């Protein structure tokens, strides 16, 4: 269990954050720039000191202002991966990795981390000759070789282009499953959060607005200003049922039935999460015929967003919650109301790799079209 209840102030910025979360898997700290994300994990690492409060990880108290406890950063057993890697430019990759070691590691332990991150070809090179993605892999390896009890990652993909981001996301997913180390991951990218996170901590203006399972928080209408209105949607847990070679589609089973997505080579039984954006969902009063949309899912309207703008969000229960963003004119002309039976229409082509994340026990490491 990670327990945080801290108060911190610098100049005009104040952080007043309190939450607790299970220490298994990935805890994502998510929020807009300036919400306090980096400050919060710097407090966890001991790089910043709270004015008052308490921080504990799995029962070990790292900071307690009332008890006079403030464990120095080097004694907290916390690994930290920064945005820019922060490698020593005059050292080879191998020396950078060895510098991060805590105590004596066997050759087998060192080699396991090197293999995990595919660092063998880089060991004799210097940071100046590496790509941005390669530098981040080395930084992750150095943090892991410190044998931390907790790994902090502060927007590690922020400086990378789309291709390098996809590369590093795959390695982080692999690390998550193979190392089994609790990770606190800071990001303002909903794509990254959906792929990686188990628990979501939403920060807004220095306070914790909500904490809970990713699927629950991403599906709440009241949190859409924080999770992102344009990218807003639902996250659905699913399992690979089969792939149809003749249609080049994969069937995913979920609590409401079956979803069709572009073919993947993920194995049958693989668990993953599927993100369905509200803007990709249409609504119909009856199941339509003669259309190209492959996913037609029956459900019940459970909530309709407030406001008077031209667009409105409608929450539909299809066995799990899903959002649809439609025009207010469509809402009124179809007379859509809470309690109505309705059909949600989702194009198969609206699903891509960025809209899919790992499951609770597996990872998705292949493109989905």
Image (cartoon, helix red, strand yellow):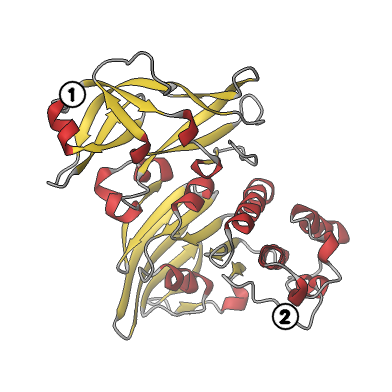
* Residue 40 percent location from the top left of the image: 43, 69
Residue 300 is labelled as none
Lower position in the chain sequence, tag 1 or tag 2: 2
Q: Is residue 93 above or below residue 330?
A: below
- Count of labels in the image: 2
Which element is circle 2 on? loop
* Residue 307 percent location from the top left of the image: 14, 47
155 on left or right of 362? left
Residue 88 is labelled as 2
> Measuring 20% from the left and 34% from the top, which residue is drawn there?
303
Q: Residues within 10 Å of mark 1 (few under 14, many from 20)?
A: few
113 on left or right of 153? right
> Measuring 37% from the left and 36% from the top, which residue is drawn there?
280
Which element is circle 1 on? loop
Residue 339 is labelled as 1
Q: Is residue 26 above or below residue 337?
A: below
């Amino acid at each position: 269990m990670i327990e945080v209840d801290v108060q911190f102030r610098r100049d005009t910025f104040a952080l007043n954050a309190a939450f607790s979360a299970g220490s298994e898997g990935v805890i994502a700290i998510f929020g807009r720039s300036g919400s306090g994300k980096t400050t919060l994990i710097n407090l966890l690492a001991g790089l910043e000191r709270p004015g008052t409060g308490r921080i504990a990880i799995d029962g070990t108290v790292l900071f307690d202002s009332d008890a006079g406890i403030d464990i120095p950063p080097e004694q907290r057993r916390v690994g930290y991966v920064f945005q820019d890697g922060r490698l020593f430019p005059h050292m080879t990759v191998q020396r950078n990795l060895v510098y991060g070691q805590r105590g004596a590691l066997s050759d087998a332990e060192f080699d396991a981390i090197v293999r995990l991150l595919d660092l063998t070809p880089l060991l004799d090179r210097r940071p100046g000759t590496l790509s941005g993605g390669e530098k981040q892999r080395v930084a992750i390896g150095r943090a892991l070789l410190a044998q931390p009890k907790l790994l902090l990652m502060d927007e590690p993909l922020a400086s990378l282009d789309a291709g390098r981001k996809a590369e590093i996301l795959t390695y982080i997913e692999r690390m998550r499953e193979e190392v089994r180390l609790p990770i606190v991951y800071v990001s303002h990218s909903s794509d990254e959060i959906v792929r990686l996170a188990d628990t979501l901590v939403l920060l807004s203006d220095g306070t914790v607005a909500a904490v809970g399972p990713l699927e629950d928080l991403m599906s709440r209408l009241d949190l859409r200003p924080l999770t992102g209105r344009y990218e807003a949607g639902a996250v659905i847990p699913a399992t690979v049922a089969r792939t149809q070679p003749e249609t080049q589609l994969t069937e995913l089973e979920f609590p409401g039935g079956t979803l069709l997505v572009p073919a993947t080579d993920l194995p049958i039984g693989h668990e993953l999460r599927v993100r369905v954006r509200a803007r990709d969902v249409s609504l119909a009063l009856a199941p339509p015929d003669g259309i190209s949309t492959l996913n037609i899912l029956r459900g019940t309207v459970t909530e309709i967003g407030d406001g008077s703008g031209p667009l409105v969000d409608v929450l539909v229960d299809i066995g799990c919650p899903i959002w649809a963003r439609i025009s207010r004119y469509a809402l009124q002309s179809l007379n859509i109301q809470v309690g109505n039976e309705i059909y949600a229409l989702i194009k198969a082509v609206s699903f891509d790799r960025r809209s899919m994340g790992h499951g609770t026990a597996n990872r998705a490491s292949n493109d989905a079209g």
